[in-house]
Image (spheres, rainbow, N blue to C red):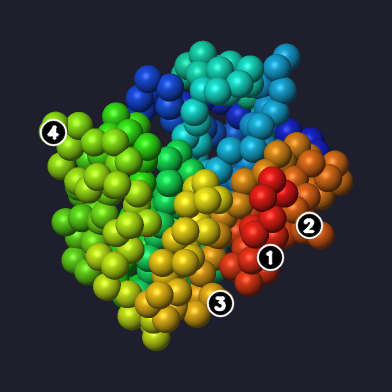
Amino acid sequence: MDDPLLPHEAEVAEYIRESAGIFTLRLRFRDPAVHAGYRFAPGQFNMLYLYGAGEVPISVVSDPLDDTLFDHTIRALGRVTRGFAQLRAADRLGIRGPYGRGWPLDQARGRDVVIITGGLGCAPAVSLINYIVRRREEFGRLVIMQGVKHADDLIWAERYRRWSQMAQTQVVVAADVGTPLWPWQVGHVTDFIGQAHIDARKTIVMMCGPEGMMRAAVGGLQAYGLPESAVWLSMERSMQCAVGRCGHCQIGGKFVCKDGPVFNYPQVRELLAVRGL
């Protein structure tokens, strides 16, 4: 896209309700040339603009091979996202993007990949999972570890079951609070890192979710001898311009919108240790 601050008009092709407060918008650009030229990498995000309400950063959850439509999964929390929840097929919105640095897929090829996520923080990892699943022969073992606060918070349960049935793929789902019929683990997802059977010599780890969860996960991974350089994090901050001009997403000397949102752990190790930064 030519002007990074100019949104292009898109329309909703499909609205999918995932849970009471979470939904997916399947989108297409209205200009066929813009749509044909749109490209993104797993881990990148778009700025979605709702006319008369505002703009928010939302991760793309599609696989880049899905070139007909692209998806955004959204939790209705604020004024803008609650407005998006009211959209239906053929409604219009603005999109800028894609922005940021995605997951290190070239480094992951040929290696075991462990993906650790928490809550709806899983959204930046969904396109990563879809990418690997569609190109399964290019990667080693795939371990997907998803944590939620309550069993009722889990969306895409059927996807996790389907992924768990693939060759060389392991799925660990954990809820802090379970229910009588909860089929997976009860506890923090970081409590079950040992189940991933990590081979530190050939494993790369990619994480997204609450920073406390990611710090705990790094500690658990180090116990298995995994080098810090093999750990990648997707960070969240208030990204308002997406091009490093407004400063709202600055963390130390870095801008999450353009230097991230995906960072190699050594790049942000010291920053994560500062509470409230």
7 left or right, relative to 58: right
What residue would you read off at disc 4?
181
Residue 90 place in picture, x, y as percent: 51, 18
Q: Amino acid at mark 2?
A: Gly
Spatial CA span between label 4 and label 1: 41 Å
Please name which of the two marks, 4 or 1, marks the residue nearer to the observer.
Answer: 1
Q: Circle 2: is it few (<14), some (14-19), or many (20+) Cα within 10 Å?
A: few
Spatial CA span between label 3 and label 2: 20 Å
Q: Amino acid at mark 3?
A: Ser
Q: Amino acid at mark 1?
A: Glu
Residue 152 place in picture, x, y as percent: 29, 29
Q: Amino acid at mark 4?
A: Leu
What residue would you read off at disc 2?
252
Residue 253 picture quarter: bottom right
For the point 40% across and 60% down, which residue is it?
115
For the point 42% across and 70% down, which residue is it?
221
Residue 269 place in picture, x, y as percent: 64, 66
The label shown at residue 229 is 3
Q: Is residue 270 above or below residue 246?
A: below
Image marks 4 and 1: residues in contact by CB distance under 8 Å: no
Q: Secondary structure at mark 4?
A: loop
Q: Is residue 166 above or below residue 176?
A: below
Image marks 1 and 2: residues in contact by CB distance under 8 Å: yes
Residue 11 picture quarter: top right
Residue 193 place in picture, x, y as percent: 33, 63
What residue would you read off at disc 1?
270
Spatial CA span between label 2 and label 4: 44 Å
Please name which of the two marks, 1 or 2, marks the residue nearer to the observer.
Answer: 1
Image marks 3 and 4: residues in contact by CB distance under 8 Å: no
